[in-house]
Amino acid sequence: MKHIWRFLLQKFLHFLLLLVALSVISFVLVGLSPVNPIDAYIGADVMRVGAEQRELIAQRWGLDQPMTTRFFLWLGQLLQGNLGTSMTYNQTVSQVIAERFEASLALMGLAWLFSGAFGVLLGVVAGAKEGSLIDRVIRIYAYTLASAPAFWIALLLLIIFSVTLQVTPICCAKPPGILAADVTLWQKLHHLLLPALTLSVIGVANIALHTREKLIEILHSNYALFAYAQGETTTGVVLHHGLRNVALPAITLQFASLGELFGGSVLIEKVFNYPGLGNATVQAALRSDVPLLLGIVFFSATFVFIGNTLADLSYQVIDPRIRFGKSA
Amino acid sequence: MILNLSKIHIFSWFWAILSVQLLFACSHVASSPPAAKISGESKDEIVLAFLWEDFDDKGFDPTMGWNYYGPPLFQSTLLRRNENLELVNDLAQNYTISSDRKIWTFKIREDVRFSDGQPLTAEDVAYTFNQTKESGGLLDLSVLDKAVVKGNYEVELHLKRPQITFINQIASLGIVPKHAHNKNYFRNPIGSGPYRLVQWNPGEQIIAEANPYYYGTPANIKRLVILLTLEDATFAAAKAGRVDVARIPPSLAIQQIPGMNLYAHRSDGHAGLMLPYIPNTGKKTSQGYPIGNDVTADPAIRQAVNYAINRQVLVDAILEGYGSPAYTPVSGMPWEEAKAKIQDADANKAKQILAAAGWEDKNGDGILEKQGLKAEFSILYPAKDSVRQGLALAVAQMLKPIGIQVNAEGRSWKEIERRLHSDVVLYVLGTYDQLILYNLYHSSVAQGNWQNPGYYANSVVDQNLDRGMTAASETEARLFWQKIQWDGQTGITTKGDAASTWLVSPDQTYFVNGCLDLGKQKQVTHNYTGSILANVTSWKWNCD
């Protein structure tokens, strides 16, 4: 038990350092960005907003202060647990993130499960049938997915299923004109299906190929040979010896892919007009909305960090050899 | 102003989205149109898509700038412009302007209730104005000193200086209830407009229903569902029969959708070239950007450009016919000066003007020179905007035969900002607010930003602008808005200083369900301006 606490404490310190570094880097980058946040805020009204009003807008959002002052003001707020207010949405950053993440969570969660399940399944089948036709088909499929940009796949699927066949919706998270309370679970899933499927593509190829490699390695190992010698079938070796060993890289990849999943959802949400965190990220960056951008950076860092920590902890369960307390 | 192309946006857009649109545009041509309507709307509910994605972020708080250059839908305004851009009373019963033109007194209706049933009083009006002035939002009320309650239904607006265009701000600002205005108001707007908000899903849709407390003519259409989709998703949804009113770019208007009519209506958007007015003497803006251009500083060049361009060809070729030629920044507005119009596409006249000013082609390369200076300039436009690109390239083609070399350059907004005062920039602006005339041409606003970018200065124009601003009424001011265009001696348009080259005013194009009567002519006309929603309460559903 002592070890696990030490491990978590260490992780936590790492995490704090990461956040400090992230906030400094983000502030510097936004400071160097060519986007003038006041112009971006005013947008089309540029000819109707005079110098006096520009000043007022700058004051309201603290944009009249130098970047360093803004950084320390923001830091002070943060220490009181306040992430600030988003210029883009006129709303506190925590509110924006909470609302947007709700939509994204369903999308990313579903995509994550899809990619994990499909990836492992395809990898195991391909590995067990190394060299066969089905192995080759799966590999070609995985290579194609791995090299195709997610948004491009999204477009293809959208054109095939939504525009031509009209079996999936064209956009959004729910059908138009229906009150939030009246939206059925089926309607929600219907609107989630295509985006989640597309997003899962990001993870599938990776996990399938790594799982396949690992399984082939296991099937060629001495202990597999020993099992065969005792009359075990290939299916038996895969089930009794393969899966446990294969799980390690698969789970690592699965949790490590949370970062990519986050990035992928930005593009996917844009293509499907899905109102999640991805859309908010794009807006925040395009408008130099520093508090929102930092809020999202923090949030995504936390998200990815927790994912990786969970992967580390899961080894404890799966692989007795790397359990805490075992002298290495 | 909802025109996509009218945005002076500093955004460089995601190129991925662009490819979405391209792919979509192609796919629609091929796909067969579905005949039946899929959504189950009755005559009480219609689905609209206005390309409003920009108004979606910030919600519906007028004190932060919510309106879309039409009625603010959920709130109502003291005055408003009808579909012919005439000012009419809305909440106001009448108003007077004091003799020093600094105090505007409004008597307001006594029968108005907010959508929560509470009465609307002078308190609410004064609160709205004072709050908006301080909020640092998008509506510039800096000319307002304070709003004062004079009685239950009487309010005074005190201005710091006389300014007749303040009337446009008054017609833009929806009145909010003092008792229910808080930091969550933007998503729960309570107002006295014809509709009230039922649900807003940011990035997806707005659902509104008729406000039972509305004091005006009750709306025929009881429910509006406004989709917040992008251009191509909007078009796809219209084709799929899911939308009753769809705003689409003119480039898609040439297509046909069975069961839908095309409405093209004249908008207040105008596209024009901003020409640097002064020569380059090494002067710089406070940010260090160069000012002046020796070629465009020559009035002969500016006039020749104006005469040589064939504006009708621009309308037909770039806007697919959905627009009209523009000779002034306010073409088609009631305050356009008709005498400022010229006969364009006149290459001979352009050549004469240039020759008379000493421009000639000595080395035979097809480009004129004058004292070693080549007749050459760049037109800058935001690279991703295909309409502006088309205009810039067409202008370059049209000026070549008269010996002027134009380089059309697609650039980022950031680079355009740096070269704004030393190169020609293609502006697209919504110009129904006459304040924009002031901000385009008054010498005092040339301070190194988007306003008067060419450093135009003419004391007669300045005087007329000042007199227009301080006029006692909009009618009186109109005379001066006309004079600045061309007063018989001087002005900003071609016959005068040719301070800029106005090209076209694009129409707004909509596909509208054949069963929906918007109370306007169905044929394509270029007649009216203003927002399509100006008469939303009189829209009718004509089928069962």
Image (cartoon, helix red, strand yellow):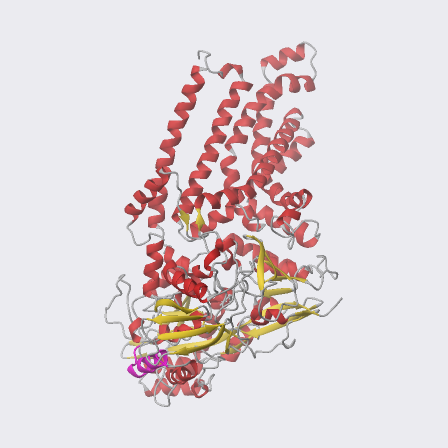
As for residue B465 lying within the magenta part, the answer is yes
x and y percent of residue A69 in the render?
A: 28, 46
State the residue lying farthest toward the front: B151
Taking the image as drawn, is residue B212 in sight? yes
Residue B253 lies left or right of residue B125; in this view the side is right
Is residue A44 positioned above or below B15 on the image? below
Q: Residue furthest bottom?
A: B488
Where does the magenta region start and end?
B457-471
Residue situated in front as seen by the camera: B166 or A109: B166
* Residue B361 position within the rendered picture, expressed as x and y whole percent measured from the top left: 35, 81
From this viewpoint, which residue is outermost toward the left? B282
Is A305 drawn above or below residue A267 in the view shown? above
Residue A215 is inside the magenta segment: no
Percent position of residue B290, x then y? 28, 66
Figure disc tally: 0
Majority SS type along the magenta span: helix
Kindly tell me whether residue B433 is visible in this rendering: no
Nearer to us in this view, A172 or A321: A172
Residue depicted at x 56% and y 71%: B534
B339 or B272, nearer to the observer: B339
Quadrant for the C terminus of chain B in the image: bottom right
The quarter of the displayed image where residue B213 is located? bottom right
Q: Quadrant of residue B20?
A: bottom right
* Front residue of this view, candidates A146 and A253: A253
Q: Quadrant of residue B46?
A: bottom right
Image coordinates of residue B125 in percent, x first then y, are 44, 66
